[in-house]
Image: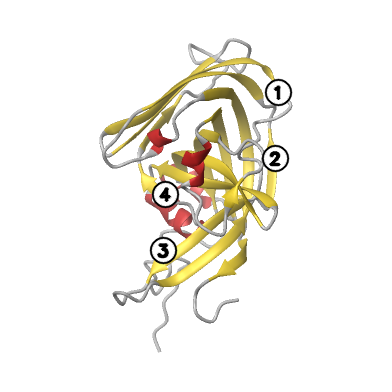
């Protein structure tokens, strides 16, 4: 009897072609986080039931650029960097569910297929994009992590620029921001293969880091611009009031989540 292996398609006799390995997934990354306030109604329109806007500061948004290296438990991807290195930009808002505050990723772009596959599993709405950000370095012209250091970042998708920012660091900070500081509340949804039959998978899940470590956060100011696009809606989260910008290096382990609600047949 033939059996196939692999955590994610394609599943084969050996499992070597599977797009992503089984968790836990380990991440090392440089993050630029820009927080600002937008029209709370624009946040509300992105929150499906049963989620509600955050009670405090409901219009707060975090737009985050991340330069990642990631791997499974064995770490072999780090020695084949095309399998470990990727970049992403994602927009996070806050919401409440049964009286608890959550973060929620409402838009996200990545530049590798394996990152999209992980997002499908975790409930992130990942799409392909072109993402770039300045990397710090202790030598040469690259910025050091110090007062006055300037970092740039850009995001494009479907050949159109969606966002650009210049961050100027001021000083060390006691926090890396507050919008993306809660467990994530995401939906995992898959339409039925039969037309008109609704969703084959319909889950509201909670997800977060199994472990986290981070370097010293730095706070600064951001010059952020968002641009209209015929195929994207990030610009609807327009900047009404800047809050702050942050730089931080982090290490994260992800190892599964928790089901909060399910509309799929037979699920609790």
Label 2 SS: strand
For residue 163, side relative to residue 188 (left or right): left
Which is more N-terminal, label 4 or label 1? 4
Residue indicated by mark 4 = 126
In the foreground, 185 or 60: 60
Residue indicated by mark 3 = 18
Residue indicated by mark 2 = 213
Label 4 SS: strand
Marks 1 and 4 sit apart, C-alpha to C-alpha, by 30 Å
Could you say where residue 56 lies in the image, as x and y percent from the top left? Answer: 67, 38
Marks 2 and 3 sit apart, C-alpha to C-alpha, by 29 Å
Marks 1 and 3 sit apart, C-alpha to C-alpha, by 41 Å
Q: Nearer the viewer, mark 1 or mark 3?
A: 1
Which is more N-terminal, label 2 or label 1? 1
For residue 71, side relative to residue 161 (left or right): right
Is there CB contact under 8 Å for labels 1 and 3?
Answer: no
Which is more N-terminal, label 3 or label 4? 3
Q: Nearer the viewer, mark 2 or mark 3?
A: 2
For the point 56% across and 51% down, which residue is it?
Answer: 75
Which is more N-terminal, label 4 or label 2? 4
In the foreground, 192 or 128: 192
Q: Nearer the viewer, mark 1 or mark 2?
A: 1
Residue indicated by mark 1 = 173
Is there CB contact under 8 Å for labels 2 and 3?
Answer: no
| Crowd class of label 3 (few under 14; some 14 to 19; many from 20; radius 10 Å) | some
């Amino acid at each position: 009897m033939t059996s196939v292996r692999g955590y994610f398609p394609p599943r084969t006799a050996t499992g070597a072609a599977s797009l992503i390995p089984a968790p836990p997934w380990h991440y090392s990354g440089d993050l630029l986080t820009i927080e600002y306030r937008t029209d709370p109604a624009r946040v509300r329109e992105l929150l499906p039931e049963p989620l509600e806007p955050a009670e405090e500061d409901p219009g707060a948004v975090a737009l985050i650029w991340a330069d990642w290296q990631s791997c499974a438990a064995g770490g072999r991807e780090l020695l084949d960097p095309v399998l470990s290195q990727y970049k992403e930009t994602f927009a996070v808002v806050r919401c409440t569910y049964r009286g608890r505050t959550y973060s929620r990723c409402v838009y996200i772009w990545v530049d590798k297929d394996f990152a999209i596959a992980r997002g499908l599993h975790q409930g992130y709405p990942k799409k392909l994009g072109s993402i770039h950000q300045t990397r710090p370095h202790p030598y040469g012209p690259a910025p050091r992590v110090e007062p006055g250091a300037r970092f740039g970042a850009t995001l494009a998708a479907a050949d159109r620029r969606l966002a650009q920012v210049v961050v100027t660091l001021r000083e060390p900070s006691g926090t890396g921001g507050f919008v993306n500081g809660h467990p994530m509340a995401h939906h995992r949804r898959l339409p039925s293969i039969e037309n008109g039959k609704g969703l084959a998978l319909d889950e509201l899940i909670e997800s977060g880091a199994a472990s986290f470590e981070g370097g010293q956060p730095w706070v600064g100011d951001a010059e952020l611009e968002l641009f209209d696009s015929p195929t994207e809606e990030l610009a609807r989260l327009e900047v009404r009031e800047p809050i702050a910008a942050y730089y931080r290096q982090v290490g994260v382990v992800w190892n599964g989540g928790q089901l909060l609600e399910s509309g799929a047949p037979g699920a609790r």
